[in-house]
Image (tube, coloured by chain):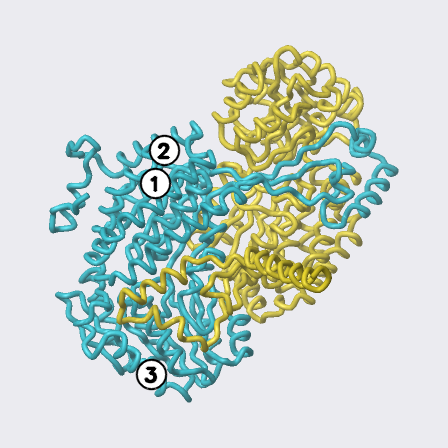
Chain colours: A yellow, B cyan
Amino acid sequence: MSREQQVAERTRRAFLTGRTRPLKYRVSQLKALRCFIVEQQKDIAEALQKDLGKTEYGTQLYEMLGLEDEITVALDHLAEWAAPRPVGKTLLTAMDEVYIQPEPLGVVLIIGAWNYPWALTMQPLIGAIAAGNAVVVKPSEVCTHTAKVMEDLLPRYLDKELYPVVTGGALETQELLRQRFDHIFYTGSSTVGKLVMEAAARHLSPVTLELGGKSPCYVDKDCDLAVACRRITWGKFVNCGQTCIAPDYVLCEPAIQDRLLQEMRRCIKEFYTDDPKSFPDYGRIINRRHFQRVKALLEGSMVAIGGDSDESQCYIAPTVLRDVKPEAKVMQEEIFGPVLPILPVSGPDEAIRFINSHEKPLVLYIFSSSKKVIKQMIAETSSGGVLANDCLVHYTVSALPFGGVGHSGMGRYHGKCTFDQLSNLRSCLIKTLSIEVINRMRYPPHTAEKLRWARILLLTRLRLGRLRQLALVALLGMLAAFMYKRFIM
Amino acid sequence: MSAPPSPSPTRWFKALKRTKSGESCMKTCPVLCAELLNRARAAHRAGRAMKESFRHAQLEAVVRMMQDHECDFVDALGKDLHKHRFETVMLELIMVKNEALYAASNLKRWMEPQHMDRTLATSLDEGLVVSEPLGVVLVVGAWSSPVQHCLVPLVGAIAAGNCVIINPSEISSHTAALLLRLLPSYLDNECYHVLLAGTNDLLEIIDLKFDHIFFTGNGTLGSKVAQVAARSLTPVTLVLGGKNPCYVDRQCDIGTTAKRIAWARFQNAGQTMVAPDYVLCHADVRDQLVQALRSSLNQFYGSDPRESCSFGRLVNVETVKRVKDLLWKSGKVAIGGQVNEAEKYVAPTVLTEVVETDPIMQHEVFGPVLPIQTVNSLDEAISLIGQQEKPLCVYVYSSNSKVVSRMMRETSSGTFCANDCVLQSLMPMLPFGGVGSSGMGSYHGRHSFDTFSHRKSCLLRGTRIECVTYLRYPPYDDRNLSLMTWASSLSQKGQGWCQIL
């Protein structure tokens, strides 16, 4: 029996003991996870420094603050999320209890990504724990130090049997995917996403796939260009462009391209100094393979800002390309690097046509002061999410479900969505064995009379709101009549 | 419109593969599907199915179709499954009509964007979730409830603004032919299509790339559908079968219990996905239950159910052979047991002395045979249920609310019903779907609308708060981080901390 098979079976046995069911237990695990995040800050930051060159502040801001927030939201709302959810009734079920009861799915597999190894692995873990599942955590092997920290330290805080961490590369992941899970949560590329979904389908396991794509960023001529450029620059070059929701490319009218470039040049200098290479807050490409891939994308396009690189350090300067054509190399795949192409378009209509002729992205960015333009773009394109006048931050709003559509993924998470996504929302109807008289009309032998009654009972909707209204009107009417009689007559 | 003259379903099937002008069509199913898919996609791109008024009109057309052609549906289902008019109307037509009416009356509300509650922290932004159609949806129906399995998802997909291709099962060929004939007369001809394709062609059709696949059927084919769909990252909803357990406690009104179980089990000759598949009966009441079942069956179908027009037939000889095989190798026949292959008839049968290793306890029955396994306690029943795959439904009959609670808490299934069967799958307000081997995703009512929609989160920010957001920009320093951490702890009450970002 392989190690992965053993882990999967042990985790399932642990789940079947039922100890994740009581809310108290889930709360204790979430609090323990919060302790882990707070107490192990230093080790977490050091590991990320070694893996991705992230500074401590970058780690805090982009990985850990969000996790603490998710845990707080879960702790505050768990009782409400896990409670039975009553639904509307019909005449037939007027005397019954009708509700949806959330329950755990069982054992969830979370496959994390390397670009934000903590945020993208722990966020779904928080929701999975809240929903009462056991979880097998598989961090990305690309971040070797982070994976080690997870493997060594997480078991000191969370139940070892219910939330094991399994490290390893492609072979180990494939072996894990051969096991049966009750849900698989994957963050990464579309190519691997297809393989994960296919493996899951063999066991009829549902999946949540958080994939990538080319997220377009439309900059309208009618917008505060200085602020827009700051936000785009920030959103693009954070983590050296290696963010699934980074603006991949910009669409704007030719008339504002020069001004855009001027502002971006200024922002890059302000954020990363004249020499980003020696500036600690500017990251690196994860490895040589990706470095070569991103560098090759520059071919055939005009570099307006940056463009220099150093393979020995996997360094690519913050780069902006101008007048890029749709057939250019850089427009054929998700960039996932610090290269921002600008494609000129004649206006929102052409931008919409361009966006719709490509796969649905994870997010659409729109920079405009015109509500009309924003509404038009929302209505006439499709994407996982939309963010107007900023970049990235929609990810942090736990009230808004986050996820892709089409090639950019399936399923939703954050806040209550994670809880629902990783729960079985079971429909429950509790009847009594009395009042059999109503049921008589459904039993054979079937007659026309019985059918008539069946039609009435099944087709009449119980408008409780309406009934309440009518009752209120009747009451008011009676009160008015009483008052009239008493005081006026 | 008169019914088609051809007597044999197969011939009729082939004859129906004609184009509108009446020419004989030699195209294969995948080729035909590709053409229909192109037309549907073009219609979707043109935004044809999007407007609220359009969706409303289509939903009303579905209601009219059900009303105008009630007799045709009753006739078709009578030929396919020997279904009584009552069952067709109540469990197929009314269900579709109910869903369409429910969708039509709630459509406006469902289509409205949902606004995020504003708190102090989010007062400067507008957050909303917009529901948009996925695109072109494929609905694959099963033969056991052929109208409902195709048209209830169709209603949801229409309400959500999609274009749809429905693929009714070729096994219930008269109903499939009827749907092929009727749909073009009621629904928009560019957005909605009927494709008659067998299971052999299904996987090739899915490869053509849809935006969602809704499949009702068995688990083996369901898994293959999901695997092929994965190649193009197509989301799926699978409503699969399974063995739905039914626990009968010693504390219950046996007479009423038996009636409700018998009704649920033997309607449509046991060919219902939500029927109780097997009974776990407390030893104390086993004999009473069998007696009560005998009495109920007599009441429903008379002394010879073969003569009763209220009792159905199995869909084909292959199914009869399968069911016969199961019933002869398992337990002891307490009621019924008669089989007539030529008539596709299996009598309403109850088996006792069944053990978990019997063949009938290893496979979904899907026929008018009800095995009863005796258990000595609720614990034993829960343990036996836990050993099987998660089913579509778990049923329990007990007047003791503690027993009902325990059964609910300690088992898992798509749906749960206490003291009755089937009804939980008829309510538009309750999501209906499986879990684990019984499926993924759900539908009915609002849940259909959500299944066939993409719920797009939109966050609209202003540009005037740059004085605060500057804290997030590099170069990073201690002071900025402390300020942000402090601010985020203030805004942590439920809505996220992006406002200080």
Depth check, mark 2 against mark 3: the one in front is: 3
Q: Amino acid at mark 1?
A: Ile
Q: Are marks 1 and 2 in contact (CB under 8 Å)?
A: yes
- Asked whether, in this view, residue B170 is left or right of residue B278, the answer is left
Label of residue B425 in the image: none
Q: Residues within 10 Å of mark 1 (few under 14, many from 20)?
A: many
- Asked whether, in this view, residue B32 is left or right of residue A29, the answer is left
Front residue of this view, candidates A146 and A180: A180
Label of residue B165 in the image: 1
Q: Are marks 3 and 1 in contact (CB under 8 Å)?
A: no
Q: Amino acid at mark 2?
A: Ala
Label located before the other in sequence (1 or 2): 2
Dot 2 falls on a residue whose secondary structure is helix
Label located before the other in sequence (2 or 3): 2
Residues at discs 2 and 3 both on one chain? yes
Residues at discs 1 and 2 both on one chain? yes
Q: Which residue is mark 2?
A: B40
Q: Which residue is mark 3?
A: B292
Residue B378 vertical position relative to residue B428 in the rendered view, above or below:
below
Q: How many marks?
A: 3
Dot 3 falls on a residue whose secondary structure is helix
Q: Amino acid at mark 3?
A: Ala
Q: Residues within 10 Å of mark 3 (few under 14, many from 20)?
A: some
CA separation in Å, label 3 and label 1: 46 Å
Q: Residues within 10 Å of mark 2 (few under 14, many from 20)?
A: many
In the rendered image, the quadrant that contains the C terminus of chain A is bottom right
Q: Chain of mark 2?
A: B
Front residue of this view, candidates A72 and B284: B284
Task: Write the residue at 19% across / 39% down.
Answer: B17
Task: Write the residue at 33% across / 83% down.
Answer: B292
Dot 1 falls on a residue whose secondary structure is strand
Query: Residue A331, percent across and down?
Result: 54, 23
